[in-house]
Image (cartoon, rainbow, N blue to C red):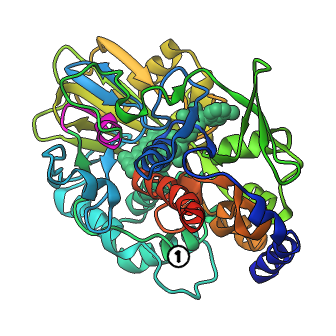
Amino acid sequence: MRREISEQKSQSSCASANMTATWSKNKDTARIVIIGAGASGIAAATRLLEQGFRHVQLLEAEDRIGGRIHTIPFAANVIDLGAQWCHGEVGNVVFERVKDLDLLEKSGDPSPHFVRSNKESLGEDQAKALQNFMDSSATISEADYEGSVGDYLTQKYWQNFPSMDRAVAKEALDCIKKIFCGSEACDHLFELSPQNFLTFDECEGDHNLSWRDKGYKQFLRVLMNVQQEIQPEDLGILKGHVLLNKRIAEINWQGVDELTIRCWNGEIITADHVICTVSLGVLKEQHKQLFVPALPAPKMGAIEGLRLGTVDKFLLEFAEQPLPEKMLNFSCLWLKADLQELRGSEHFWLEGICGFHRVAHQPRLIEGWIIGSSARHMETLTEEKVLEGLLWLFRKFLPFDVPHPKRFLRSQWHSNPNFRGSYSYHPTYADELRTGRYDLEFPLAADCGRPRVQFAGEATSRTHFSTVHGATETGWREADRLNEFYKVRA
Ligand SMILES: Cc1cc2nc3c(=O)[nH]c(=O)nc-3n(C[C@H](O)[C@H](O)[C@H](O)COP(=O)(O)OP(=O)(O)OC[C@H]3O[C@@H](n4cnc5c(N)ncnc54)[C@H](O)[C@@H]3O)c2cc1C
């Protein structure tokens, strides 16, 4: 199917080959509009400017740059509502870019802590065995595996723990599944395709490198070449190239010449190239109105088939750290009867919570994670209701008191129309549709390969999707695509 598409493209492009000769733009005059100032948009813009393009404009719907990197002041210093850790070292462009700047810190390897809903903790050996299972046995490497990740993991789990008390083992399996859903952003593992593991290129090294007390925003400052001492809102080399509060309503790519971009306030902007970096969630919700004419069928298939899942965070600041010294984190194991009761109560959404942990450089903080439909429901509740639920959960699971926090925040990635979720995954449905990230990535080109509308963003990364390093690579990929095109014309 993919070969057919490229054949179709090259036929139409060669038919209008004479137009290539008439394309008179160069790096000084070509107008490039990048939609979205997240990691991929910033990576694309900064690289294009470094490559000598002069007319580069970033249009961002929010009143801030960063997208799913959102570092804000909180408690002792800052917190990240979105991306938080640099996942790996070898082959990780984020790590490569900052490794000599002394910005990242190793995470150490905190022992896991599992608590049951009757306040019992699992023993250290049992907890370590579960952690080892998650670290080593649960990712798929068999290329021809037919089932879902849920099938695979369940089978492996029972092979690994044949003699564990059945009730506890079942509770722990449910908890492990939630932890995996948290890292993959799926609602449940039985919808998750093995493709997520087979195509993802894991970067070796520490997977939870923290940005100390500065947050992930530091990386964007490095990309933009912002000097540390200057104002926090300094845009470095992007100064004069970013327009905030510019939500794009329509990209008209009719014809072969300039493109017309309509903002929500009716303003019209014209360009020679558009790099669209909006999230897969935004594409899903808006592509039918956003693109005129409609996108080609393979692109629409990818937008329909791939998914953007929801993972949200809770941040609680206390007067003093409420967890005992040795407890760095805890995950929740629901006893069957308690779970049944929970499901019938107003707190049913708490089932989607994966666990809580302390945060480096934030001594009085606890951070929690929630996934899937529970997260989406949580986003609709008031902050008071959410906090009431969390305090109820603490009382249910922990054998010590957790006081009312001084401050509380939660993320709402799904409710925000500029995101509609957290990060992308490849469900088994995409396998059924025979689509994938390659269909999301391909640019809409005019004559003999001149890119007109390009697609970047984490969901378009074939090997590092759902991460900042993946998003950054896609921004660079599309900048390089344009650079290659204009190099021939220099
Ligand atoms: C809770 C959470 C935790 C995460 N943790 C990590 C982590 O620890 N490590 C890691 O590597 N990754 C993590 N990620 C993933 C990482 O944040 C993303 O993969 C990455 O930031 C995506 O960048 P992007 O440029 O592709 O998209 P985005 O950051 O979404 O950028 C797209 C931009 O487009 C804008 N936009 C949308 N619609 C329009 C429109 N119509 N007009 C104009 N602008 C528009 C948006 O406002 C946004 O700023 C996490 C994400 C979340 C949500």
Name which quarter of the figure residue 22 lies in.
bottom right
Q: Amino acid at mark 1?
A: Tyr
Name which quarter of the figure residue 425 lies in.
bottom right
**Crowd around label 1: few <14 · some 14–19 · many ≥20 (10 Å):** some
Q: Is residue 435 left or right of residue 464?
A: right
Query: What percent of the width, then of the height, locates residue 38?
Result: 49, 39
Name which quarter of the figure residue 206 lies in.
bottom left
Magenta stretch containing residue 358, yes or no?
no
Q: Mark 1: which secondary structure?
A: helix
Q: Which quadrant, please, contains the C terminus? A: bottom right
Q: Can you see residue 342?
A: no
For image coordinates 81% across by 50% down, the residue present is: 257
The image shows residue 324, relative to residue 209, as above or below, that is above
Q: Is residue 241 left or right of residue 398?
A: right
Disc tally is 1
Query: What percent of the width, then of the height, locates residue 150?
Result: 56, 67
Q: Is residue 227 left or right of residue 185?
A: left
Q: Is residue 216 left or right of residue 240?
A: left
Q: Which quadrant, please, contains the N terminus? A: bottom right
Query: What percent of the width, then of the height, locates residue 359?
Result: 23, 35
For image coordinates 32% across by 68% down, the residue present is: 91
Identify the residue position indicated by label 1 in the image.
152
Please state which of residues 284 and 23 is positioned toward the viewer in this rendering: 23
Please state which of residues 471 and 229 is positioned toward the viewer in this rendering: 229
For image coordinates 34% across by 31% down, the residue present is: 236
The image shows residue 13, relative to residue 370, as above or below, that is below
**Disc 1: residue Cβ within 8 A of ligand 1's nearest atom:** no
Query: What percent of the width, then of the height, locates residue 264?
Result: 75, 22
For image coordinates 17% across by 40% down, the residue present is: 327
Please state which of residues 170 and 426 is positioned toward the viewer in this rendering: 426
Find the magenta span and give its range.
212-223
